[in-house]
Image (cartoon, rainbow, N blue to C red):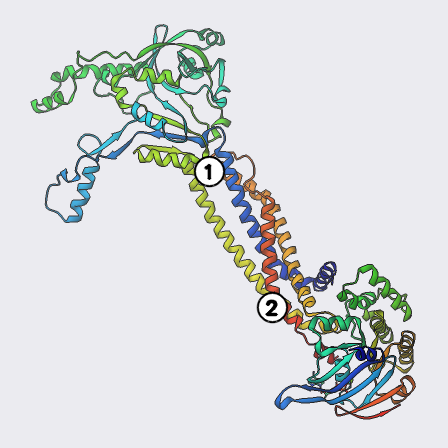
Amino acid sequence: MGSDRDEDDEVAIRAVELRKVYGARDARVEALRGVSIEVKNGERLALLGKSGSGKSTLLNLLGGLDRPSSGRLRVGGRDLDRLSGREMARFRSTTVGMIFQSFNLIPSRSATENVELPMIFAGRSPRDRRAVAREALESVGLGERMEHRPDQLSGGESQRVAVARALANRPRVLLADEPTGNLDSQTARQVMALILDHVREHAATLVLVTHDEELAATCTDRVVRLVDGRIAAEST
Amino acid sequence: MRWFDLFRWALAALGQQKLRTSLTTLGVVFGAFVLAASLSINEGVQETIQREASKGDAARKVTVHPAWRANRDSKKDQVEVKGRMSAERHERIRKALADRRGGGGLAERVDLTSDRLETLARLPHVRRLIPIVGGPVVATLGHRPEDASLSSGAGEDPEFRKRVVAGRAFEAEDERSVLLSEMFAYRIGLVDDADIAQVIGKPLRIEFWNPEEGPSFEVSLAGRSRGGGRDEWLALRQLAWQLPGMLDQFRLTADESSILKKAIRQPSAAAVPIDAADDYQVVGIFRELTHEENKDAWSRFPADTDLILPRQTAVDLYFRDPARRKGGVHRAVLLIDDMRNVKEVVDRVEALDLRSESIVRFVERERLTYLLIFGGMTCVAAVALLVSALGIANTMLMSVLQRRREIGIMKAVGAADWQLQALFLVEGGLIGLIGGVSGLLLAWTISFPGDAWVRSMIRRDMQIDLSGSIFAFPARIGVIVLFFTIGVTVVAALYPARRASKVDPVTALRHD
Ligand SMILES: Nc1ncnc2c1ncn2[C@@H]1O[C@H](COP(=O)(O)OP(=O)(O)O)[C@@H](O)[C@H]1O
Ligand SMILES: [Mg+2]
């Protein structure tokens, strides 16, 4: 057990022979066919691959949104296959932060409330989480837009709210699924900069899913390529 | 997740869909309204009945009357039915003959004799027995005999004391005093105020009319009198006295004449003169009931009588006649220790084959009516709540489908299944709370015109002015109504809540 602990300090993510199968019989899709991967603490990893290669599926497993069909998975020091539903929810709200291509903000809630959301479910006090949300929004440059609803914000601003939400809890692991896919290049650069600043500042681990070879090369330490649910190649 | 947040988010979600929420809540409002109104009326009516019935002693009084009962000793078979007829008809006629009262029949009268009165007085829960006698008397003030009606009555009743306009009311059950009604005094010529003042303290001779002393038949003007009054009536009475002696002077056959002679009782010289007369001191004058007092259903006694004697005094006078003593008193009032025991006493009185009257009967009938109304309304409320529960389940299920993405986001950022379930259950509960409170408020608001309406109806139909409202809203009703509405809506939200918690975040977030 002692060695496990030592490992925890070094390894943020360890996946062993992950498989994920969707559907049954005729509609059966093997999204992941035995993926093994290890990401060190503070490492920045890029996941590249064609559409449908299983990148999002892998990221969702890492983020605890879904469970693998088989294989073992340890993220942020927790064995995900051993967590109960409740513990999994707690894991999602505290250990990892997720950013999606389509922002995934609740349209009827203000920016602040969207940022507060994970903390609400984690049961933090209103005063506490409000302060945290304010700080997070200020740090992404939205100090003036805290009470705006997503439909009153531009795409870039929306994604910055989503970034603030993902970062507010200071997660050890940040999972970003094509975070700039819906943004123009200039806005994309700003958003990426925010993410990278945070990662650097808090020594967080980043897994970035992207199409963009150049982005992958400039922003991450290591690139992993997925083809048809398998890891095809690795490069640093 | 904190309770506070749970409510805030649920409320916000409801606020998001104002129209849908209002429509869904409307059903609950209706159900809660009917339920609240039903409970409130039930409660209020019970209270009102209790209140009205316990005005004065009315609720604790049982009035006992003599009654007829089938003679137990004689065998019914003794009745002879003539003729050949079907068994059914034979039985019907036999029964009618057997039940025939008095002379030829086999039914016998159960009188309120001294013995029976004693039995009644000893019944459990009977505090006091008040024998009541009365009837036509001849009252003589000075030298003027006058016909008058006599009651035996109450000095202790404060309602009655209010009506004593001169002199005083009785102080004891057996004092040798008499009270005169204002109208009787006026009739016998005590017209001026001075006359009234002067009559107090004077003796009044009261004599019970003895039917044995009168002629054996009456002569009347078949309603054609032009108002000859007392003199005319006395003349007719005189005629009735003399007619039997003059039968021979009419043109009658010998048969007719002998039939009538046999039927008409001759005034017997041997009749014992009954000493049922005595002098009593006039101590007060009482006025008639006012219109207002008359409306008050329970305080009618004594309403229209000329003279009132103290109860015991009246019974003593009445019983001087052995025949009357044998026949017993007209009625007796039993005063029961507690309203709740009235029913038991009534049952016991009826077991003695006596007839009784009490408010309990009336109250029970009213209760039954309201129980039916209450039951009916509660059914309506139950149906309304059930239907609105289906509506809520339906709309919430729709809303779960509509908010799938939102639910997915919540799960993605850390909402546990139970939290989402709680969120939807609270949403349902809030609909119940809002609907329940609105329904209660509505019922409360409607209760004012409703009360006025029912009141006016009762005033018109029963000439009773109710005090207090027939709607009552104790806190209990609020608790019950909210318990039901919230309970029903939470149950309705169970399935949608479960569905919400089962939303798969991956699928929910996959498509834009
Ligand atoms: N919930 C799902 N149900 C069925 N098939 C799915 C589901 N999610 C993903 N897939 C399939 O799994 C494969 C991988 O999908 P995904 O991980 O989204 O690819 P990527 O993100 O690389 O474009 C695709 O063929 C996709 O159709
Ligand atoms: Mg994808």
Residue A100 in sight in this render = no
- For the residue with label 2, is its CB less than 8 Å from the closest atom of ligand 1? no
Numbered label attached to residue B391: none
Q: Helix or strand or loop: what does disc 1 sit on?
A: helix
Measured as percent of width and height from the top left, residue B435 is found at 63, 56
Determine the chain carrying the residue at label 2: B
Measured as percent of width and height from the top left, residue B388 is found at 58, 61
The amino acid pointed to by label 1 is Asp
Q: Quadrant of ligand 1?
A: bottom right
Label 1 crowd (10 A; few <14 / some 14-19 / many >=20): few
Q: Nearer the viewer, mark 1 or mark 2?
A: 2
Q: Which residue is mark 2?
A: B495
Work out whether residue A33 or residue B184 is closer to the camera in this orientation and state it.
A33
Label 2 crowd (10 A; few <14 / some 14-19 / many >=20): some
Numbered label attached to residue B461: 1
Residue A197 in sight in this render = yes
Which residue occupies 30% across, 26% down?
Answer: B116
The amino acid pointed to by label 2 is Tyr
Determine the chain carrying the residue at label 1: B
